[in-house]
Image (tube, grey):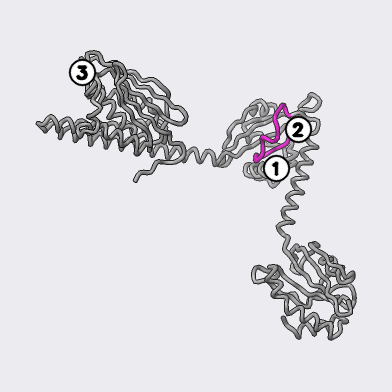
Amino acid sequence: MNRQQLIDLCKEYTDLTDLDTEHLISIADKLPYIANLNETDIFIDALNRNGKNAIVLAWARPGSRSLYKRSVVGELAYDYSEPAVLRSLKTGEAYRNIRGESQEGVPIAQTVVPISNSERKIIGVLIMERDISEEIRQEKQVQFLSRTAEQLSNTLMHLSMDGHKFGDWLGNGIFILNGRGKITYANTIAAQIYRTHNKTEEPAGCMFDYSLINCSSMDEMLAYLKEPVEYAVNKMNYLFQAFPLVAYGELSGSVISVQDITDLRKKEQELNAQSIILKEIHHRVKNNLQNIAALLRLQMRRSDSELIRQEFEASINRIISIAIVHEVFAYDEWDYINVTDFLNRLLTFLVDSITSPEHKITTQIDGEGILLKSSQAVPLALVLNELLSNSLKHGLSQVAEGKLKIVLQEKEDRVNILISDNGPGYDPNSLQSPKRLGLQIVYSLVEEQLQGRFRIKRTGTMTQASVSFPILRTKEVHHE
């Protein structure tokens, strides 16, 4: 604060005494603290001796953003731009949030408090200013929306909309046409679309260009746009739909709704591209797995050990079961697999590779088309491969007419799979044997990766293996 400047201004513009000036100086010394505390510009003004305006004696700006680019100390404050200042100086009353305009033309709200001397005479005012530019902008928007609503109300009064409601069009571009096809109203979105196509500054008052929607008249447009129709306008995608405005039984105009679906189409294209890429990846993974299986099959044929050949065959079947998963992904939904489709392919492969043509086996798959994410599909594929291979190789191979039934069920966000065969059964004590590695794999995959349960039992003449696990809905399973 420039002490001498304040003294000089008081002498030049006011009738304040030296004591009054000293009192204002003592307050001015505290202005920086007040400005930082409130994060606003703080002033001291005094009444000019002409009684018509005020003089700015002191100013403190906050440490944060100020309303002023330069000092306004020594400038005059007029009643038309800062009414609260002159009012408080003359009445001695405090005023809060009174609107005005700063010396730099910024809309402000002023809180003004009078300063009095020991004799209770008003010698100045303390002013706090706040920028209200954003409030003014929002108020203008509200006023515009109010005018728009009033215009729509006046335009559509006594008109029926054939059962359609404006609430369905929130966020859309809206054109209102009179009976002659002239645009009487276009909201901001509609105006922007129209300007892009017709290069006009303001569509309101213009005749609607029916060529925009490949029509030549209002009647043709209303017939053609009874349901939403997509059009491309300057590389943008829009859905147009038209509704008649009927007054006293006669057509008096129309309302055209325009919905911008450009982003939707772009996202669809991106998803399609991702889908194609992922399907190609699944296709290549499937081919690579089949190549690995072929190499293992060549290696298997070179071995004279039946035990080694059996282990090779089991490993090959496991690889092929995973390859089938990727094959299904390559042709179906790229993030989900249909378990029934996968089972049909896997069962066909296993029956052809494990059983002989003369061995009669009847297979049956019952149940729903359950969809699983890839994180669950791969471990389930290995589980089903082990169970079906075990059934075909060790169970049904020992009966003249084999029966294999698979039941799929989805209940309470769980997948339940029941595999039954009429083989001779199993030895419960042998399940943990090293020779029963396949079933140990099943236990591990079901309980650890699928977070489910696996049971195997003998019921009458049937051996039944059941697998139950929760369906993954929202997030992937992560394994250590």
Residue under label 3, please give it: 398
Task: Looking at the image, tell me whether mark 1 or mark 2 is earlier in sequence order.
Answer: 2
**What is the CA distance from the residue labelled 3 to the residue labelled 1?**
79 Å
**What is the CA distance from the residue labelled 1 to the residue labelled 2?**
19 Å
Residue 265 at x, y = what percent? 52, 38
Residue range in magenta is 161-181
Q: Can residue 281 be seen from the camera position used here?
A: no
Task: Identify the amino acid type marked 3.
Answer: Gln
Residue under label 2, please give it: 180
Task: Identify the amino acid type marked 2.
Answer: Arg
Task: Looking at the image, tell me whether mark 3 or mark 1 is earlier in sequence order.
Answer: 1
Task: Give the numbered dot on residue 187.
Answer: 1
Q: Is residue 459 magenta?
A: no
**What is the CA distance from the residue labelled 2 to the residue labelled 3?**
87 Å
Q: Can residue 19 be seen from the camera position used here?
A: yes
Residue 94 at x, y = what percent? 84, 67
- How crowded pointer 1 is (Cα within 10 Å; few <14, some 14-19, many 20+) is rated as some
* Secondary structure at numbered mark 3: helix
Task: Identify the amino acid type marked 1.
Answer: Asn
